[in-house]
Amino acid sequence: MKRIVSLKSNKNFRRTYEKGSVFKSRLAILYLFPNGLEEKRVGYSVTRKIGKAVIRNRIKRLFREAYRIYYNDLKEGYDIVFVARKAAVDIKLEDMKKCMGELFRKSGIFKC
């Protein structure tokens, strides 16, 4: 398995928000932008409106784990940003996996 590359710079996040495609579900919003590279990069955003640091970090851990499960099934060459919604506060990993699978199906970035 290849190493998962993270989006780090504010410039890349902004470009993905402004020019990318948007797909929404009950738990999260997916922003998708073709980056022209031979790799997919991912970023996670959880605002302070969601809760305190413990809650925000838990949601990010769930995002990372669910993304890791789908990583090999996704096409290369995209910047992906997940933004948590308020409903994501009390969820389990299984719910996050379902949500992420649904968002990936909507966006059409599954390889098959």
Image (cartoon, helix red, strand yellow):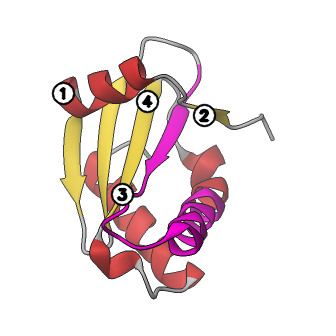
Q: Residues within 10 Å of mark 3 (few under 14, many from 20)?
A: few
What separation in Å lies between label 2 and label 4 (alpha carbons)?
Answer: 9 Å
Name the residue: 48% across, 74% down.
Answer: 96
Observer able to see residue 87: yes
Disc on res. 79:
4
Tag nearer the camera, 2 or 3: 3
Question: SS at mark 1?
Answer: helix
Percent x, y of residue 43: 49, 41
The kind of residue tagged 1 is Glu
* Mark 4 Cα shell of 10 Å, populated few (<14), some (14-19), many (≥20): many
Q: Is residue 41 magenta?
A: yes
Q: Residue at x 47, y 48 (%)?
A: 44
Residue extent of the magenta highlight: 39-66
Magenta residue check for 12: no
Q: The disc labelled 4 sits on which kind of residue?
A: Asp
In which image quadrant can residue 3 be found? top right
- Per the model, the C-alpha gap separating discs 1 and 4 is 12 Å
Sequence-wise, the earlier of marks 3 and 1 is 1
Of pointers 1 and 2, the one earlier in the residue sequence: 2
- In three-dimensional space, the C-alpha distance between marks 2 and 3, rounded to whole angstroms, equals 18 Å
Label 1 vs label 2: CA separation? 19 Å
The residue wearing badge 1 is: 18
- The reply to whether discs 2 and 4 touch (Cβ–Cβ < 8 Å) is no
Image coords of residue 106 (percent x, y) = 26, 55
Dot in front, 3 or 1: 3
